[in-house]
Image: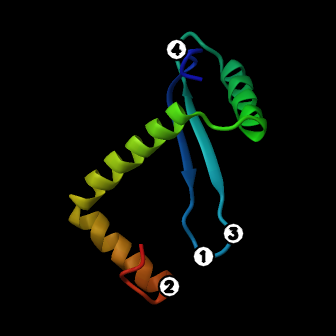
């Protein structure tokens, strides 16, 4: 999707909860592109992921992004408090994150 330059932002989110969760793909259409073009591009990419393996480069980028996010989260006391509360409420174990 990056090569097509159709989105200014793309996010993928898995809701963390006990039991079944939802997976969201969200994208912001870049100026000069249409939502329909971006939706078609996203659908093609999801179809590709169902048949072709993820490349090593894609895995490395995802790993580095996750590591950066985890490092940033550890600096936030509010996020730490939220995680502790979530672990306590959902799993009866505040240390589970």
Residue farthest toward the bottom in the current orientation of the protein: 92
Which dot, 4 or 2, sits closer to the camera? 2
Cβ atoms under marks 3 and 2 closer than 8 Å: no
Q: Residues within 10 Å of mark 1 (few under 14, many from 20)?
A: few
Q: Is residue 9 left or right of residue 52?
A: left
Quadrant where the image shows the C terminus: bottom left
Which dot, 4 or 3, sits closer to the camera? 3
Residue farthest toward the top in the current orientation of the protein: 32
Q: Residues within 10 Å of mark 4 (few under 14, many from 20)?
A: few
Between 34 and 50, which is closer to the camera in this rendering? Answer: 50
Q: How crowded is mark 2: few (under 14 residues within 10 Å), some or many (20 or more)?
A: some
At x 52% / y 14%, what residue is drawn? Answer: 31
N-terminal label among 4 and 3:
3
At x 41% / y 85%, what residue is drawn? Answer: 88
Cβ atoms under marks 2 and 1 closer than 8 Å: yes
At x 69% / y 69%, what residue is drawn? Answer: 20
N-terminal label among 3 and 2:
3
Q: Is residue 85 left or right of residue 55?
A: left
The answer to whether 96 is drawn above or below residue 73 in the figure is: below
Q: Is residue 6 left or right of residue 51?
A: left
Picture mark count: 4
Residue that badge 4 annotates: 31
The part of the image, by quadrant, that contains residue 42 is top right
Report, in whole angstroms, how far the alpha carbon at label 4 lies from the one at label 2. 44 Å
Residue that badge 2 annotates: 91
Q: How far from the left and from the top, in percent, is residue 30?
A: 53, 18
């Amino acid at each position: 999707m990056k090569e097509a330059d159709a989105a200014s932002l793309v996010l993928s989110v898995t809701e963390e909860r006990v039991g079944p969760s939802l997976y969201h793909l969200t994208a912001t259409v870049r100026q000069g592109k249409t939502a329909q073009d971006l939706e078609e591009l996203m659908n093609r990419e999801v179809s590709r992921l169902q048949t072709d393996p993820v490349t090593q480069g894609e895995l490395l980028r995802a790993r580095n992004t996750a590591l950066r996010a985890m490092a940033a989260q550890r600096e936030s006391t509010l996020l730490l408090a939220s995680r502790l509360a979530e672990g306590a409420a959902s799993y009866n174990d505040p240390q589970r994150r």
